[in-house]
Amino acid sequence: MKKSFGAKTLVFPTPVWVVCTYDREGRPNAMSAAWGGICCSQPPCLAVSLRKATYTYGNIVARKAFTINVPSEIHARQADYFGMVSGKNVDKFSAAELTPIRSSIVDAPFIEEFPLVVECRLLHSIEIGLHTQFVGEILDVKAEDSVFDEKGYVDIEKVRPILFEPEINTYHGVGKLLGRAFSMGKEIRGKSPR
């Protein structure tokens, strides 16, 4: 039997992303965000939802670009910090001892030390309620050499992304491999009536 919790922001997994932008003066800014995911295959797009009160919200509206930076488990402390203070008042990169790199593709910086970066131009913004969902068209994905597997794919176990538990505010790593997608279910598909 399932217990009802009511309407809550509870779903798994929830990513820990760091959204990077430039402000109006060209200063790099970084903000942690967990309300996000891939939202379209063609064109390749992702969505991230932010409150209007954030400094990053205004930066995205002004610059029409942002990067999504996927921190590894070793950067959990810095990712958490990026969600605790406003870039309006603090140079978060200096405080976190991380390096902003100017993208040559979009008008936004990315974090040199993080293993995976997605560069986006703003495609749409949708007012939902407390949050605005920004849909970014993915123009490039950059990954560190150290996170590729032997076949040339980005390996989630080498990236070691962080997951957020929104109900009790905790961070987690990725678990063990369960099997290959679009393969494990073949046995059931073979048994199902057509």
Image: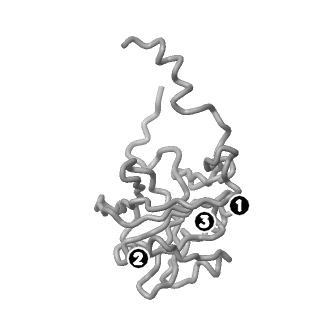
- Numbered mark located on residue 59 in the image: 2
Q: Is residue 62 left or right of residue 85?
A: left
- Observer-nearest of 162 and 129: 162
Residue 53 appears anywhere in the view? no
Please, is residue 18 above or below residue 93 in the view? above
Q: Earlier in the sequence, mark 3 or mark 1?
A: 1
Amino acid tagged 1:
Ile
Image location (x, y in percent) of residue 1: 48, 25
- Numbered mark located on residue 161 in the image: none
Q: At 54% across and 65% down in the image, what residue appears? A: 18
Q: Earlier in the sequence, mark 2 or mark 3?
A: 2
Image location (x, y in percent) of residue 187: 53, 17
Amino acid tagged 3:
Ala
- Observer-nearest of 161 and 6: 161
Q: Earlier in the sequence, mark 2 or mark 1?
A: 2
Q: At 63% across and 33% down in the image, what residue appears? A: 178
Residue under numbered circle 3: 79
Please, is residue 55 above or below residue 138 in the view? below
Image location (x, y in percent) of residue 136: 39, 61
Is the residue marked by circle 3 packed among few (<14), some (14-19), or many (20+) residues within 10 Å? many
Residue under numbered circle 1: 74
Is the residue marked by circle 1 packed among few (<14), some (14-19), or many (20+) residues within 10 Å? few
- Mark 3, secondary structure of its residue: helix
Give the distance between the C-alpha atoms of the residues marked 2 and 3, in whole angstroms. Answer: 19 Å
Q: Nearer the viewer, mark 2 or mark 3?
A: 2
User: Picture quarter containing residue 55?
Assistant: bottom left
Amino acid tagged 2:
Asn
